[in-house]
Image (spheres, helix red, strand yellow):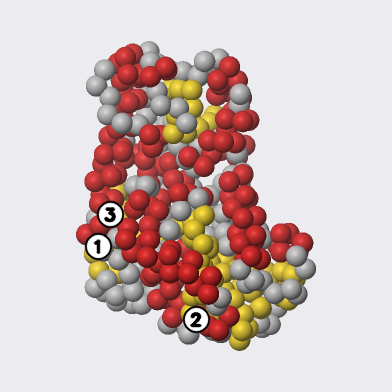
């Protein structure tokens, strides 16, 4: 159904659809390879609220549950970096209680925070007790259909002088790197730092620090508190820099956001052109990373198992299944090596370091790892010779 009365946070009906990917399968629906077709499909559109500036899913659909995957090493490394930053900024107390809100993405800060003397309780445990730090560090907030209620729940756990920490894949990074495939069912909100600061302000919170990290091309950790006096001059300078950078990217400009439409058409077309030319020229191409962000890309490109014979993934629960909306099989990393591809397209750039390190047999056999985002127009079959590809 359409959003209905209005924005998922402020309720406004004034806004604009900025990206429409048509009907897409749920990115969690990895059906068995021989299961009946077609897979279910639902509208996948991004709507931007002109009042609170929140980019969000325009539609709500009941989607199948996601198979449990293996957490990428890059995400675990991000948590370590985030805790180091929180300690540097003196945003964590020497002792106290932390309430961590869970995320379907898995992962937890509990062990890391326990090492520095903090007691970590799940959001649902002892919910009547205020917490010195409330943490939404694994992208949990974006999974809430009712954004106002979800943010209110986090604010309600906060002690009078406590700190709320939110980690999110920035809309600025999505725009800068043309990551339109980040739009997916079940991810209801796409935050910019300016918009999120405004949302927090409606609950009496003031942003006091922010830091941008390289995960996903631009992940932001944002800290806010009712006690604005907790802000340190250096922290405020970092916050202002993030805000200025994101505004310059056009996160508050609907016309700039509309550019994601053209990016989707262009990158999907480039991928199909590459694979069509590769097949015609005899170049063996497989892919790595059966992740949710790859689903819309493969479907918008109209790919099948003839153009892309397999996508390898580290998660055993996905083996023997197919990429949602396609008949492209998900294969094991061992099978990827056994097939000796000339090229392995990495569908998520953050997976490249661990995949390359874990599967040295690809390069030993003469294959190359290539990030799908580096593909450009191809005019000749010769361009697909392995030596001509731009490896990362």
Instruction: Give residue 242's position: percent from left, percent from top.
Output: 43, 63
Dot 1 and dot 3 residues touching (CB under 8 Å) = no
Mark before the other along the chain sequence, 3 or 2: 3
Q: Say which element carries label 1.
A: helix
Report the residue marked by disc 2: 205
Q: Is 96 located above or below residue 287 in the figure?
A: below
Q: How crowded is mark 2: few (under 14 residues within 10 Å), some or many (20 or more)?
A: many
Front position among marks 3 and 2:
2
Report the front residue among 289 and 237. 237
Residue 375 falls left or right of residue 160: left
Q: Is 357 located above or below residue 77 in the figure?
A: above
Q: Quadrant of residue 163?
A: bottom right
Mark 3 and mark 2: span between their CA atoms?
A: 31 Å
Mark before the other along the chain sequence, 1 or 3: 3
Residue 36 falls left or right of residue 158: left
Q: Residue at x 48, y 79 (%)?
A: 206
Dot 3 and dot 2 residues touching (CB under 8 Å) = no
Report the residue marked by disc 1: 254
Q: Residue at x 31, y 38 (%)?
A: 267
Mark before the other along the chain sequence, 1 or 2: 2
Q: Is residue 143 visible?
A: no
Instruction: Give residue 236's position: percent from left, percent from top.
Output: 49, 72
Dot 1 and dot 2 residues touching (CB under 8 Å) = no
Q: Is 246 located above or below residue 296 in the figure?
A: below
Mark 1 and mark 3: span between their CA atoms?
A: 11 Å
Mark 1 and mark 2: span between their CA atoms?
A: 26 Å
């Amino acid at each position: 159904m359409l959003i209905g009365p209005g924005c998922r946070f402020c309720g406004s009906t004034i806004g604009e659809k900025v990206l429409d990917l048509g009907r897409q399968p749920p990115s969690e629906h990895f059906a068995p390879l021989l299961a009946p077709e077609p897979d279910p499909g639902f509208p996948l559109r991004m709507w931007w609220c002109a009042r609170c500036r929140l980019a969000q899913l325009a539609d709500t659909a009941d989607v199948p549950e996601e198979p449990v995957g293996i957490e990428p090493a890059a995400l675990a490394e991000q948590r370590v970096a985030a805790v180091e930053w929180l300690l540097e900024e003196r945003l964590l107390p020497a002792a106290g209680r932390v309430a961590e809100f869970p995320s379907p993405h898995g992962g937890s800060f509990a062990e890391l925070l326990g090492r520095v003397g903090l007691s970590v309780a799940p959001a649902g445990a002892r919910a009547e007790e205020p917490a010195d730090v409330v943490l939404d560090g694994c992208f949990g907030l974006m999974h809430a259909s009712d954004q106002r209620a979800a943010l209110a729940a986090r604010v309600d756990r906060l002690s009078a002088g406590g700190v709320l920490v939110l980690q999110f894949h920035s809309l600025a990074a999505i725009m800068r790197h043309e990551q339109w495939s980040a739009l997916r069912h079940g991810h209801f909100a796409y935050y910019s730092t300016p918009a999120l600061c405004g949302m927090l302000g409606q609950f009496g919170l003031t942003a006091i620090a922010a830091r941008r990290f390289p995960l996903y091309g631009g992940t932001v950790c944002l800290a806010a508190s009712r006690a604005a006096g907790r802000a340190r001059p250096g922290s405020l300078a970092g916050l202002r820099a993030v805000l200025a950078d994101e505004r310059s990217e056009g996160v508050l400009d609907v016309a700039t956001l509309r550019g994601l439409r053209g990016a989707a058409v262009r990158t999907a077309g480039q991928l199909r052109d590459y694979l069509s030319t590769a097949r015609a020229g005899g170049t063996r191409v497989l892919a790595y990373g059966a992740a949710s962000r790859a689903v819309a890309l493969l479907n918008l490109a109209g790919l099948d198992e003839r153009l892309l014979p397999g996508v390898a993934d580290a998660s055993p629960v996905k083996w023997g299944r197919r990429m949602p909306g396609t008949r492209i099989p998900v294969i094991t990393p061992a099978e990827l090596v056994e097939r000796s591809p000339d090229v392995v397209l990495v569908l998520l750039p953050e997976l490249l370091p661990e995949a390359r390190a874990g599967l040295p047999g690809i390069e030993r056999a003469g294959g190359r790892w290539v990030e799908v985002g580096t593909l450009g127009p191809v005019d000749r079959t010769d361009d697909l010779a392995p030596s001509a590809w731009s490896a990362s």
